[in-house]
Amino acid sequence: MQISSNQNTLTAMMGIRSAQAAATKASERISSGLRVNRAADDPVGLGVANKLKVQVGSFSKVLDNISQGTGIVQVVDDSLTQMVEALTALRVAAVASEGTLATADRTMYQTLVDEYLESIDSVADNAVWGGDSLMSSASTKTIQSGINSGDSTSLSLEQMTVSSLSLTSLSVASSANATTSVGLIDDAMDTITNYQSYIGAMENVLDFQSNLATSNITNYSTAYGQIMNADLAQETANLASAQIQRDAATAMLAQSQTMNKELVTYLLKSVFA
């Protein structure tokens, strides 16, 4: 037996410290909801998680950018639909003017034509996004649709006005003029229809990119959570186990001290008896 160095006591104390450390870690994870609260908890895992977090944030911004682009093409699409309606009405007026009409009736149709032409320019003037005109002049919008440099989508916006559609001199003042106007209106309709097809295709592209970004956000967020988030059921079990171990070690420490005291007392009695 050793008096100055009691192995049983030292072992019990080591057990208490180990159990207390395990209980503290489990309590911290349960309280924070995180498995990794500091780099020491999982150095490699934290590095991977940080990269995943950056990508989640980047794709979230990409999603915002794509949403802006989608808004732009939707404004243009709606405006083109209104222009098609105006051109349809113009064509009806022009066809009606190809026949023999009284001067007053022809004047009425010309007034109608002029009003529809004004409405086309009005639609173009009101197609605005963030203060920028989308149809009054040609322009290109670059949308950052990926998280890496160069991952962008270019949106080519065309000028869609009475002037660009070659409808400035549209006239139904005579039957011949009306016939010419029908041809000009048909050409304008073809131009708008082709542009509508392009805009529709770009909206589909942006929708695909939006779905891809959303999917990436979900996948990276899930991977981040698997690394960083604590398993509360497991940590609760760990805490209970650590508490039992600590209590047991504490009991053994007390028992060891009692045994040592009793033995020392017995030996002293033997010496001084």
Image (cartoon, rainbow, N blue to C red):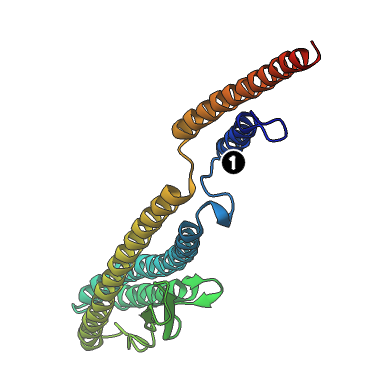
Q: Quadrant of the N terminus?
A: top right
Q: Is residue 97 above or below residue 137?
A: above
Q: Nearer the viewer, residue 4 or 191?
A: 4
Q: Nearer the viewer, residue 75 or 213?
A: 213
The quarter holding residue 97 reads bottom left
Q: Is residue 222 above or below residue 253?
A: below
Q: Residue at x 37, y 80 (%)?
A: 154
Q: Give percent across and percent down for residue 191.
A: 26, 81
Q: Is residue 254 left or right of residue 18?
A: right
Q: Give percent across and percent down for residue 93.
A: 27, 72
Q: Quadrant of the C terminus?
A: top right
- Residue holding disc 1: 32
Q: Is residue 23 above or below residue 42?
A: above
Q: Give percent across and percent down for residue 246.
A: 59, 27
**Label 1: element kind:** helix
Q: Residue at x 38, y 73 (%)?
A: 116
* Residue found at the far right of this picture: 272
The quarter holding residue 117 reads bottom left
Q: Residue at x 64, y 18 (%)?
A: 255
Q: Give percent across and percent down for residue 250.
A: 64, 24
